[in-house]
Amino acid sequence: QVHLVESGGDSVQAGGSLRLSCAASGYVSSSWVMGWFRQTAGKEREGVAGIDSDGKTTYADSLKGRFTISHDNAKNILYLQMNDLAPEDTAMYYCATGYYDDFLLDSGAYAYWGQGTQVTVSS
């Protein structure tokens, strides 16, 4: 079974940076896509960034270029570089993998999820 483990979440001041990692184990097809999502209490889970098997990336418009998703194919680790963090970025961040590259920011397109890592940004 696919197993995803996130790490790198922390408490930081506004304007700071964090790099989240997601290590994958078990069978993950090279044709599958991977993505990052975030969620806070009382809000729907939000797609942050996705990357397909060809390396094409998609980002939520609200991020305004501050976040970068990447994948280390050799190590099978997914990354999310987050710069210029703001309090509104505070959330539990989840990585996921799935099958459908047409919906990289849609949680319904993903089959496997990590446990989440908390990011807290204070002013």
Image (tube, rainbow, N blue to C red):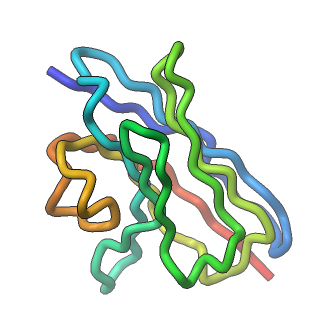
Residue 22: give x, y in percent of width and height.
48, 35
Count of residue discs: 0
Q: Is residue 115 above or below residue 93?
A: above
Residue 82: give x, y in percent of width and height.
69, 59
Dividing the picture into quadrants, the one containing residue 54 is top left
- Residue extending farthest to the front is 54
Left or right: 75 as drawn, with respect to 42: right
Residue 13: give x, y in percent of width and height.
82, 69
Q: Residue, x 56% and y 84% (percent of image)? A: 62
Left or right: 106 as drawn, with respect to 83: left
Q: Residue, x 22% and y 16% (percent of image)? A: 27
Residue 58: give x, y in percent of width and height.
47, 63
Q: Residue, x 67% and y 52% (percent of image)? A: 10
Q: Where, quadrant-wise, is the N terminus in this rendering?
A: top left
Query: Could you say which is closer to the camera, residue 16 or residue 66?
Result: 66
Q: Let me know if residue 115 appears in the view.
A: no
Query: Could you say which is closer to the camera, residue 11 or residue 25?
Result: 25
Q: Is residue 17 above or below residue 22?
A: below
Dividing the picture into quadrants, the one containing residue 99 is top left
Left or right: 103 as drawn, with respect to 48: left
Q: Let me know if residue 78 appears in the view.
A: yes
